[in-house]
């Protein structure tokens, strides 16, 4: 919960598994650059997360970390507004992950969809590891460490944020009980009146033991209806019901980033694994050449064949790069075979090149002076560490590992 004058915190991470491409730029990074103006933003390099899947190629991290940060800076992420850091530089992430693991039921991790999905998809890697099972829990530690209210992520990551909420609630329930919490809660239950108290207890048990959603809803309604309950007692009973407690860790919410379904150079979705990307700082000549040979509507075999922009991967790129009025003309020209595909691609190539020039320009000072990037990360790590240390102070205290 933020107090007046304090901005809500946003946190997100990215794994350094390869060069960033225009899909990252238009999908993720432009969004981050917007968010940094409104929120206290923490963005970090999730190198330990990369290691969970790529532990057999440890060299990829060193190869990608600095270039990734330069790509962020080139995209307009501003180190004066956002805190940029590297996960493994903040060892508290490992400690919090470990402590959270104590109260995480195995089933919760095994049920996260990405666990089985990725094992299926990345068959050439052995992902039947402890580290990979813990991937979403490490992510929970990342998020809970900074008390982030919002986590901008794509659809595939939403279950990880959901898990984080469950973990926070469970942690708060187990470690956030003050001594008389249960006693006071039971006291409050009796204030519901005999009948309602009995129903509430039964519903609560049914929810906590069997996960019966209807029972949880029923119990909530009983609380709403309880006219003798003050606000504080209601709050307490809600915590008693939901398994919450004093808020030690803050429940975050996902801030869904729309998937930029940018087409790659072969017409499939742009993705490193299809080897069809235009990278953020690509070689301009390569980009122009690659767009020129990009596949178009297969119906346009010859210049005189009319086409349908909706069946053309190049058209997806036009949605991002071309103004409505120009796009209307191009669509008409395509449908009537009034223009050829190269005519259609020319303004696109110009726009992508112009963007590349801007990206290269913003990256140049950092490429020429890598020390600047190191300094930005050093400063970001120091800021992150201060928050992390504060969280761990409290967490160690409640889990009992403080000795004096
Ligand atoms: N798992 C995320 C991804 O693959 C990366 C990530 C790690 C992350 N920790 C995070 C994202 C915390 C948001 C918040 O994209
Ligand atoms: Fe695609 Fe443009 Fe060719 Fe039509 S004219 S098929 S939209 S490249």
Image (spheres, rainbow, N blue to C red):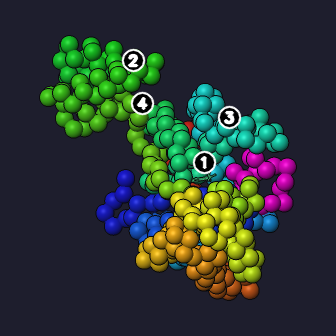
Q: Are marks 2 and 1 in contact (CB under 8 Å)?
A: no
Q: Is residue 115 visible?
A: yes
First along the sequence among labels 3 and 2: 3
Name the residue nearer the viewer: 377 or 212: 212
Badge 1 marks a residue whose secondary structure is helix
Where in the figure is residue 23, as x and y percent of width and height? 61, 63
Tell me the CA gap for discs 4 and 1. 22 Å
The region drawn magenta spans 47-61
Name the residue nearer the viewer: 180 or 188: 188
According to the image, label 3 marks what residue? 116
First along the sequence among labels 3 and 4: 3
Rendering quarter of residue 204 = top left
First along the sequence among labels 4 and 2: 2
According to the image, label 1 marks what residue? 139
Tell me the CA gap for discs 3 and 2. 31 Å
According to the image, label 2 marks what residue? 205
According to the image, label 4 marks what residue? 243
Tell me the CA gap for discs 4 and 2. 11 Å
Badge 2 marks a residue whose secondary structure is helix
First along the sequence among labels 2 and 1: 1
Residue at 64% x, 31% y is 110
């Amino acid at each position: 919960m933020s107090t007046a004058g304090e901005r809500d915190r946003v946190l997100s991470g990215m794994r350094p598994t390869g060069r960033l491409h225009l899909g990252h730029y238009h999908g993720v990074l432009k969004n981050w650059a917007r968010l940094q103006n409104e929120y206290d933003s923490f963005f970090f390099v999730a190198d330990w997360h990369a290691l969970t899947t790529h532990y057999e190629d440890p060299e990829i991290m060193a190869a990608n970390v600095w270039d990734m940060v330069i790509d962020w800076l080139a995209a307009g992420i501003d180190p004066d507004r956002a805190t940029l850091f590297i996960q493994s530089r903040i060892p508290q992430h490992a400690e919090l992950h470990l402590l959270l693991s104590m109260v995480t039921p195995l089933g919760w991790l095994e049920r996260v969809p990405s666990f089985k999905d990725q094992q299926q998809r990345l068959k050439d890697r052995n992902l039947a590891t402890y580290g990979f099972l813990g991937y979403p829990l490490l992510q929970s530690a990342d998020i809970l460490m900074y008390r982030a209210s919002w986590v901008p992520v794509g659809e595939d990551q939403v279950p990880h944020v959901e898990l984080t909420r469950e973990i926070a609630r469970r942690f708060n329930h187990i470690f956030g009980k003050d001594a008389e919490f249960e006693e006071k809660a039971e006291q409050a239950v009796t204030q519901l009146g005999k009948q309602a108290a009995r129903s509430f207890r039964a519903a609560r048990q049914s929810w906590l033991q069997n996960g019966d959603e209807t029972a949880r809803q029923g119990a909530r309604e009983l609380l709403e209806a309880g006219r003798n309950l003050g606000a504080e007692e209601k709050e307490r009973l809600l915590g008693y019901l939901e398994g919450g407690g004093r808020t030690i860790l803050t429940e975050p919410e996902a801030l869904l980033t729309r998937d930029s379904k940018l087409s790659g150079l072969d017409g499939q979705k742009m993705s490193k694994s299809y080897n069809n990307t235009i990278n953020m700082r690509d070689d301009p000549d390569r980009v122009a050449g690659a767009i020129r040979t990009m596949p178009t509507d297969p119906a346009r075999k010859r210049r005189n064949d009319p086409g349908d922009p909706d069946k053309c991967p190049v058209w997806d790129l036009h949605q991002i790069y071309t103004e409505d009025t120009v796009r209307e003309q191009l669509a008409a020209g395509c449908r009537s075979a009034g223009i050829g595909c190269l005519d259609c691609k020319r303004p696109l190539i110009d726009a992508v090149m112009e963007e590349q020039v801007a990206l290269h320009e913003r990256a140049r000072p950092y490429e020429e002076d890598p020390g600047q990037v190191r300094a930005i990360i050093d400063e970001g790590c120091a800021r992150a560490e201060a928050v992390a240390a504060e969280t761990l102070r409290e967490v160690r205290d409640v889990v009992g590992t403080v000795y004096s």
